[in-house]
Image: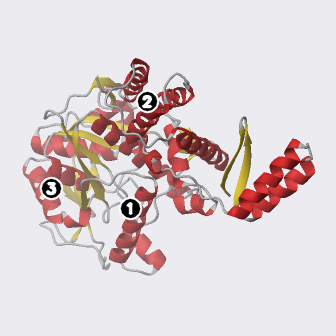
Amino acid sequence: MLTLYNTLSRKKEVFRPLKKKKVGLYTCGPTVYFYAHVGNMRTFLFEDILKRVLEYNNYKVKHVMNITDVGHLTSDADTGEDKMEKGAKREKKTVWEIADFYTKAFKKDLKRLNIKEPNIWIKASDTIKEQIALIEKLEKKGFTYKILDGVYFDSSKLKTYGRLWGEKERKLRAGARVKMVAGKKNPTDFALWKFTPRGEKRQMEWDSPWGKGFPGWHTECVVMGIKELGIPLDIHCGGIDHISIHHPNEIAQAEAAYNKKLANYWLHGEFLVLKKARMGKSKGNIIILDKLIEKGFNPLAYRYLALNAHYRSKLTFSLEAVSGAQNSLENLHHKILEIKTTSKKPTRFSRKAKTYQERFLKAINNDLDMPRALVVMWALIKDQAIENNEKYHTLIDFDKVFGLGLNKVKEIKIPQKVKELVKQREKYRKNKDWKKADEIRSEIKKLGYLVEDIEKGFKIKKA
């Protein structure tokens, strides 16, 4: 029985999809004006784990992810510059070139982190017609008003506005949200369509019944999700920062236009933090995946690090933490190679092996408890009572969720010269000539390999 924490109800709920064994999953994608940082990628990793857990439970998942290539302003107060236009000025390129470049960079990062791509990619700029139609629908139902800089949603007309905050927080958040744009009726009102400022020519602008301009960020996701998955959809995901503004505004438009919930389950991933501050482009403290790779880290070491914290808990990032995760991942690879067999997957597993499988399923089905699932995995590895073939195939099965590529782990081909140096070093170690042994270790390192002493001998890995 799969249970998920639903932000909408503030509790764990048994997951029940609209259609038997089929799931419609919508995940908020990147705004492609710059690289996604590792904090962003933590959210996409959590969503990948969710998708894998659903598939592990034999659900057929239709996963939709958007690409925001227009309409995301630098301020949540419906002010500031469009991030795409800002990125184009920064790099002296067109917004279309910026969007294409950073979309490709994002997809490359997904691949390196072994994150499954969605079944459907959808761009905001490809759904302008549908977004205009939604705003017209809201206008006819009396939920909009027009001011100098655009068309706005009147949140006071919707009694359920802010339902994602929870009843206790609705009044507090409504009065302390963001500064007011001139002409806005209520602090919680938001832009549906922004006009191109007079005397300005944007690269991305379209004609509309209200004037030339571009869609509001909150309107895009509503349209794209409903277009591909219908309403209501099963699960909508994003980062925890979307709980305060973006997702409540999506919900409001859907409920005002269709009198239906946009999604039955809302899941949100917590922040990746640096000391006491969260990581963010606006804070200037971002780290991208390329930088970790340049420092010699395997991208999957970051994935392993993310697995060590529950998706609803903050995860503190440091290079030391990634280094520790890489050591654990390499140790896991070493254990996999030790037990790897060429035998086929058993048609029947022993009672003890089944116990581990049951414990694993219980962990992942308890709101995606990956830390507990990792504990189960390491306990299985250490259990000498289970024969290697059962152990190996059980671990490969677990990795359908972990996504660490354990079925692709291969023995490192060690050059003959390195092997000879290792033999020499072992002789010095037996004779307790530690100085000579360390000198040999340094020679081996210069050749691009490391020798690590373990309880039963040593292991060699690439530097």
Circle 2 crowding by C-alpha within 10 Å: few under 14, some 14–19, many from 20: many
Residue type for callout 1: Lys
The residue pinned by badge 1 equals 107
Q: Give the CA separation, mark 3 to mark 2.
A: 40 Å
Q: Which mark is residue 135?
A: 3
Circle 3 crowding by C-alpha within 10 Å: few under 14, some 14–19, many from 20: many
Q: Which of marks 1 and 3 is nearer the N terminus?
A: 1
Q: Give the CA separation, mark 1 to mark 3.
A: 31 Å
Q: Which colour scheme is used?
A: secondary structure
In the rendered structure, are the residues bearing label 3 and label 2 in contact, judged by CB atoms less than 8 Å apart? no
Residue 385 drawn at (x, y percent)? 52, 21
Residue type for callout 3: Ile
The residue pinned by badge 2 equals 369
Q: Earlier in the sequence, mark 1 or mark 2?
A: 1
Q: Earlier in the sequence, mark 3 or mark 2?
A: 3
Residue type for callout 2: Asp
Residue at image coords 73%, 46%? 452
Of residues 452 and 317, the one nearer the viewer is 452
